[in-house]
Structures are given as C-alpha cells and as structure tokens.
Amino acid sequence: MAKRRHTPQGLKWNTLSLRLEHRIQKVAQSWEGTPYGDGQRTKQQACNCIGLVIGILDELDHRESPTPFPRLRPDAGVHRQDIGFHVIREILKSHPADVVDDGSLEPGDVVVLRSSAQGPDHSTHVLFVTSRPFQALHVPLRHKAVFTTIRPSDPIVAVYRIRNKQGWLNAT
C-alpha cells in the first residue's frame, strides 16, 4: 500500500449524497465523548483512535461481528508509524479502501496524521472524516472522542477512501 509522506498544498472537499452524509454524521456523533481506552472499541465506554475508526466503520457497514482487532505485542503501541500502518492495512482487509493522493477529503475517509515531532517514521494518529467539511472525529491520548478540523498544514501521512460507502445506506 502506497504511503503519502507529504502535506498537501491545499485540501479539496468532495460531497456525497445528503442521505449518506447524514448517516455518516449521525454515526460519528454517536461516538463523540467516548473515553480513551487503549486497545478498546466500544461506543460510549472506551476506545483508542484505531478502535474508534474500526467501531464507526463496523457500525456504518452494519456488521454483526466486529472487525478483528490486529494482534500486537503489549509494548508495541499503535502510534508507531510502522505498526500503525500494519494495523490500518489489517482493518482495510474488512473495509476495502484506496489511498487518496489528490489532496481531497470526503465524508467517511480515514486520515493518518504524523503526531510526533520526531519525524514521519515515528508516530501516527488516525481520524475519521465526518460530513462537515474538513471535520474529523478522533480520540486524543487519554481524552474523550472529539471533533477537530483538518487543515492543509496538518502533517497528513495518508488518506484512505472506503470503496463501498453506498452500502452504508442499506438497512438504515
């Protein structure tokens, strides 16, 4: 899977159908306020950034059984970029996606940010893009899930676009 190691010069916003955008926003809002919990992914109980993204994607996909959480050594930490990309690749086996490299974002995208001043190979953070332009939901370390704005100056490492977003409208 290709990695994007530069910040786009500008961001473009792509819209989806109003019905699909409403569904994405409704599910994302239902996760807002979920407390941080390392390796967790239970809405309004505990999740980390990866668990938040898995939980939202599973809910949007109407999954009866959750996406397997990739197994890691206890000391691995999903925020190390090499491990973070391994985890994301595992998640995307259940939620196929393409790497976006045109500087655009749209509701339902998964964004990976560099979250460390140590450089692009050391630390990553994952966010879920909502239906408000350039807004994403994330879980900061040891805090609750909150909305934030993605800016062109943010250290974007990769953007993944889920392929079958129209399927998120089934059985709603």
Image: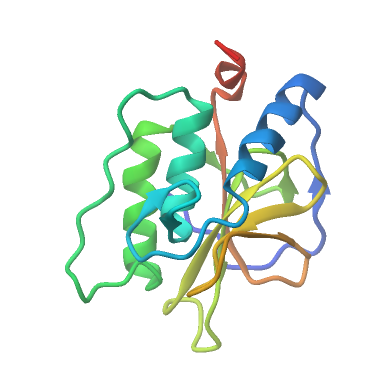
Q: How many marks?
A: 0
User: Image quadrant for the C terminus?
Assistant: top right
Left or right, 46 with respect to 18, comes to: left
Is 151 placed above or below 115 here? above
At a point 35% along the width and 56% down the height, the residue shown is: 40
Residue sticking out furthest to the top: 171
Q: Does residue 109 appear in this view?
A: yes
Q: Position of residue 150 (x, y in %)?
A: 74, 61
Residue at left offset 43%, top offset 61%: 48
Q: Residue at x 54, y 71 (%)?
A: 143
Image check: 163 left or right of 134? Answer: left
Extreme bottom residue here? 118
Depth check, front residue: 6 or 133: 133
Q: Is residue 47 above or below residue 141?
A: above
> Which of the 4 image quarters holds residue 170?
top right
Q: In front: 72, or 1?
A: 72
Quarter location, residue 83? bottom left
Q: Residue 100: image x %, image y %?
A: 61, 45
Q: Residue furthest left?
A: 73
On the picture, is 147 further left or further right than 90? right
Name the foreground residue: 58 vs 109.
58
Q: Is residue 97 visible?
A: no
Depicted 126 relative to depicted 117: above or below? above
Residue at figure coordinates x 59%, y 25% from the top left: 165
- Indicate left or right for 48 with 156 as reference: left
Q: Position of residue 43 (x, y in %)?
A: 48, 46
- Give the colour scheme of this rendering: rainbow
Residue 110, image x, y percentages: 57, 48
